[in-house]
Image: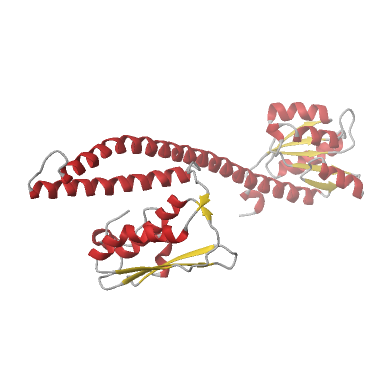
Amino acid sequence: MSESCALQPARILIVDDDPIVRSLMRATLQADGHKVIEAEDGDEACELCEKRQPDLLVADVVMPRMDGFALCSELRCRPQSAYLPILMATGLDDIPSITRAYEVGATDFISKPINWIILGYRVRYLLRASRAFEEVRRNRDQLAVAKEEAEAANRAKTEFLANMGHELRTPLNAIIGFSEIMRDGTFGPLTAKYVEYAAAIAESGAHLLAVINGILDMARAEANRLVLVEEEVEIARTVAFSIGTIEEMARRAEIDCRSEVPDDLPRFLGDAAKLRQVLINLLSNAVKFTPSGGEVTLSVERSPDDGLAFRIADTGIGIPPDKLSVALAPFGQIESGLDRKYEGT
């Protein structure tokens, strides 16, 4: 199939005060199957662009009332013709005129006397490029709409999580509080079995509350609403607290859990509570995926930029390099088999 057949015909506006030039140009373009409309000057061309909305405009530069430069500049200021391909056709082929044509928004430039064969090819190219750019603009607009819809959905999700967290934590606090009272026999002794059941309720409630708090922290972080408190942090004390929190978990799993903290650490500013939360999450994860008899180590050392590096190492099952992106994604787990063997989100 030839190029002229492959390209869809277009509505082309010719703007020239010379009727002979318009006649020759019309014959050339109609031979390629295009529909041609004509204007004698820039004023008439502006009116036709408003009414007929051409696909391409071929304009002379030297015309009465409104010349080609003014016409091009005017059309570029109008939303419906801002991207209209404009081919300037004129005998002013000096460098300043060509430069000005492009500066006022011309898409391309062709010199007079016009080679009619070249004109046909130039028009086909401009139409093909214009349609390709129009497709890009449509896709861009669709992506912008999709992005806004996704952001709106994400905001709604964050709001939902915040509201749900509040609604869930209120009854959970009651469940945990009353089960602890029953477990401790505050208002009188219970049988050993009921004490065991109350302890299980309290432990399960505390676990669920921790999951809810973690999800809420993630939602707040995504919404840029996570508040960090900057204060001086005692690193040794923070590490000891984090290790102590998971010691019982490590003891039940028969795992040796230890820390290595040098004495000459620099002054450190940060959010102590969030730092503890990060360390406890990583430590508990290390214990969870380490078999009995293994070892989990938390070490602190100076980094080259005078900061601190916290390193948690374990002798557990590890993560294959090609699965790291999955494991580190929110709620990601490597394979369904692990979902059944190890709890967690």
- Quarter of the figure with the N terminus: bottom right
Towards the viewer: 148 or 214 = 214
Give the percent coordinates (x, y) of residue 37: 74, 33
Give the percent coordinates (x, y) of residue 181: 19, 41
Residue 246 visible in image: yes
Is residue 213 depicted above or below 50 in this figure? below
Q: Is residue 273 left or right of residue 198?
A: right
Task: Say how many tags the image has.
Answer: 0
Is residue 299 depicted above or below 47 in this figure? below
Q: How is the image coloured?
A: secondary structure
Is residue 132 depicted above or below 43 in this figure? below
Give the percent coordinates (x, y) of residue 257: 33, 68
State which quadrant residue 248 falls in.
bottom left
Towards the viewer: 297 or 237 = 237
Give the percent coordinates (x, y) of residue 39: 80, 30
Towards the viewer: 195 or 318 = 195
Residue 112 visible in image: no
State which quadrant residue 106 falls in.
top right
Towards the viewer: 265 or 98 = 265
Q: Is residue 155 left or right of residue 342?
A: right
**Residue that appears at 90% across and 36% down:** 62
**Residue that appears at 91% across and 47% down:** 96
